[in-house]
Amino acid sequence: MDISVVIPLLNEEESLTELHDWIAKVMQSNQFLYEIVFIDDGSTDNSWQVISTLSQQNSSVKGIKFQKNYGKSQALNAGFKIVKGDVVITMDADLQDSPDEIPDLYKLIANDDFDLISGWKKKRFDSKIRKNLPSKLFNLAARKTSGLHLHDFNCGLKAYKNEVVKNVDVYGEMHRYIPVLAKNQGYNKIDEKVVQHQARKYGTTKFGMNRFVNGFLDLITIWFLSKFGKRPMHLFGLLGSFMFFIGLCFALYLGIDKLFINPTGRLLTQRPQFYISLIAMIIGTQLFLAGFIGELILRSKRDNDNYKISDKVNL
């Protein structure tokens, strides 16, 4: 199979048929062997009925329905597990991503041997204040933190080698950082392509301003995991040892002062240095234990299948 198209969605019944027809037309005109995998992330409208109908009309259409809304990362993760195409392309279901971009994205992966190509919506049709400005700030922070020079980390239109999606662990809300996750797994041939962005035709956006707050928090998480995810003791152990050393120095100073310099002076518990020493050593011990616990957690298997599927078609 040449291409697998993975489409996570939530309440997009109006656009699904048009999107399917558009993708099918592109695939047929380029003679691609393909599959379209719709992941219904707990829609409350008739999205699943539309997907079921499309699967009856086109055997290349597959679908997964979540029992409730788990999030885009979990939807992509479920889709990535079942795809069979040599090249995997993700796109949103709201018709803002153009299927006409698929052939060029496919060629960059299949012919030019890139591991991942991320779409760049250079010209956007979103609100400048609500989405464009926060997106630019978010992408700037992501570039500085990750070392990847991509302009649009959160673009839903991306293309991957099959082995990339099989080896990248997408969880929580980390779908924004799949290029970073791929880089951390050793896939370094990552680039971007300017893609067409279209105004939303049906419905309303499912994203609010809170996604940018969550995005920055996730960015801190991914930075920490990339730097210390496999060696938490290197961070917590170092900080813990430093804090404990500070506390120990204060304790030695107080002991020497009380025993040899000023034995008739104030009680140790009446001196602020005593509490600084005590707190520093306690914090140092806690940080060291945090690093130790982190090392233990790394040796346990994370269960990422934290979603329940209520129905499937063509699988």
Image (tube, rainbow, N blue to C red):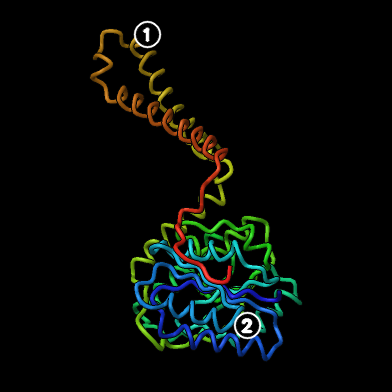
Tell me which amino acid carries mark 1.
Phe
Please state the horizontal and vertical placement of residue 11, each as a whole percent of the image. Answer: 38, 76
> Disc 2 on helix, strand or loop?
helix
Q: Residues within 10 Å of mark 2 (few under 14, many from 20)?
A: many
Circles 1, 2 touching at the beta carbon (< 8 Å): no
- Which residue is the site of mark 2? 102
Q: Quadrant of residue 231?
A: top right
- Which residue is the site of mark 1? 260
> Disc 1 on helix, strand or loop?
helix
Q: Quadrant of residue 286?
A: top left
Residue 162 versus residue 305: which sits nearer the camera? 305
Tell me which amino acid carries mark 2.
Ile
Tell me the tag on residue 163: none
Please state the horizontal and vertical placement of residue 146, each as a whole percent of the image. Answer: 55, 60
User: As displayed, is residue 240 above or below residue 82?
Assistant: above
Q: Quadrant of residue 22?
A: bottom right
Residue at left offset 43%, top offset 22%? 248
Residue 82 versus residue 182: which sits nearer the camera? 82
Residue 15 versus residue 115: which sits nearer the camera? 15
Q: Considering the image in quadrants, where does the C terminus appear?
A: bottom right
Please state the horizontal and vertical placement of residue 121, each as a whole percent of the image. Answer: 52, 81
Q: Give the mark nearer the N terminus: 1 vs 2.
A: 2
User: As displayed, is residue 75 above or below residue 246?
Assistant: below
User: As displayed, is residue 32 above or below residue 206?
Assistant: below
Residue 21 versus residue 50: which sits nearer the camera? 50
Q: CA distance from mark 1 to mark 2?
A: 80 Å
Q: Residue furthest front?
A: 56
Residue at left offset 35%, top offset 11%? 261
Residue at left offset 45%, top offset 73%? 9
